[in-house]
Image (cartoon, grey):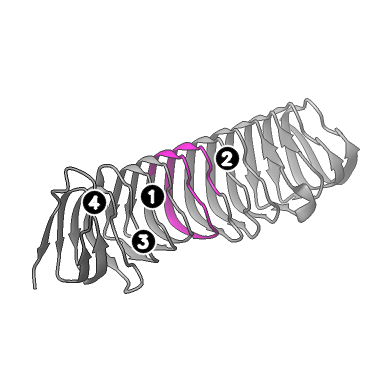
Amino acid sequence: MQLIENTEFGGERPLFASHDLHLRNVTIHAGESAIKASSNIVAENCVFEGKYPFWHVDKFVVKNCKFTPGARAALWYSSNLEMTDTIVDAPKMFREMDGIKLSNVRIPDAQETLWHCSNVDIKDVLLHNADYLFMHSHDIKIKDYEQHGNYSFQYCQNVEIDNAIIYSKDAFWNTDNVTVRNSQLHGEYLGWHSHNLTLINCHISGTQPLCYTHNLKLVDCTFDADADLCFEDSVLDATICSELTSIKNPRSGFIVVPSVGEIIIDKNIKAPADCVITQTK
């Protein structure tokens, strides 16, 4: 592997179509496509300031690096990335990629990030400004994670999340086969139109959560007082460990809950309209 260190590059495609390359203490200044169409790349202690440095790259490692705001859309159409101890301060990262592993990564501007990606493994990652995160992605594992941003995980499939704090309006819409454990989920309209969503030992806040769901499962979850009008037109099996403010027109299944402030069943409930609500206090 060729080592390039303690230098800087700028302009268009300075390292285009490179292979078996180790960059150490290198700065990529403004320009485009610095390392495009390359493979087997290691970038260590590097700074990326220009656009599109890692497009169409296969098998690359990014360690202790920084992507500045000018490096927007830096990682697209690539595969087999391992990124550790890195700050990604630019939006629209990680698009149409297969094989992403992130550890101890901070993304202050995560807007429109991680779209159409597969085989994603994330641990100890913090994201802010994360609107429209994880659109149309699948086969995702997440642990020790915190996210601030709305409309996340829409249209995702095969997702496992453990020990997360997620602030997101409209999270998990139209998802299929998602499991969340030991986590906090804060935001309005959680999980609408989802299929096979399972929440285990989670705390939920925000109005009208978990409506229009199919095969929803809740195990030992708790709800804030602002989580009202829950479960409208949903098919669910739920064991809940806190009081609920209100339940509205659940379609089918069962709900076991200590107590409910208000149960709303009106003419708009949909068949079979046979959900069994059991209050244990």
Give me the C-alpha separation between circle 3 and circle 1.
9 Å
Q: State whether residue 101 is above or below residue 218.
A: above
| Residue at (48, 59) in percent of width and height | 169
Q: Say which quadrant the N terminus sits in.
A: top right
Q: Position of residue 39 (x, y in %)?
A: 68, 27
Amino acid type, residue under disc 2 in the picture: Trp
The residue pinned by badge 1 equals 192
CB of mark 1 within 8 Å of CB of mark 2? no
Which callout, 3 or 2, points at the residue further toward the start of the chain?
Answer: 2
Q: Secondary structure at mark 4?
A: loop
Write the residue at 22% across / 48% down. Answer: 251
Q: Which region shows up in magenta?
A: 133-159
Q: Residue furthest front?
A: 267
Q: Are marks 3 and 1 in contact (CB under 8 Å)?
A: no
Q: Which residue is mark 2?
A: 115
Q: CA distance from mark 4 to mark 3?
A: 15 Å
- In magenta segment, residue 145: yes
Q: Residues within 10 Å of mark 2 (few under 14, many from 20)?
A: many
* Whole-number angstrom distance, CA of label 4 to CA of label 1: 16 Å
Q: Is residue 218 above or below residue 117?
A: below
**Residue labelled with disc 4:** 269
Q: Residue furthest right?
A: 11
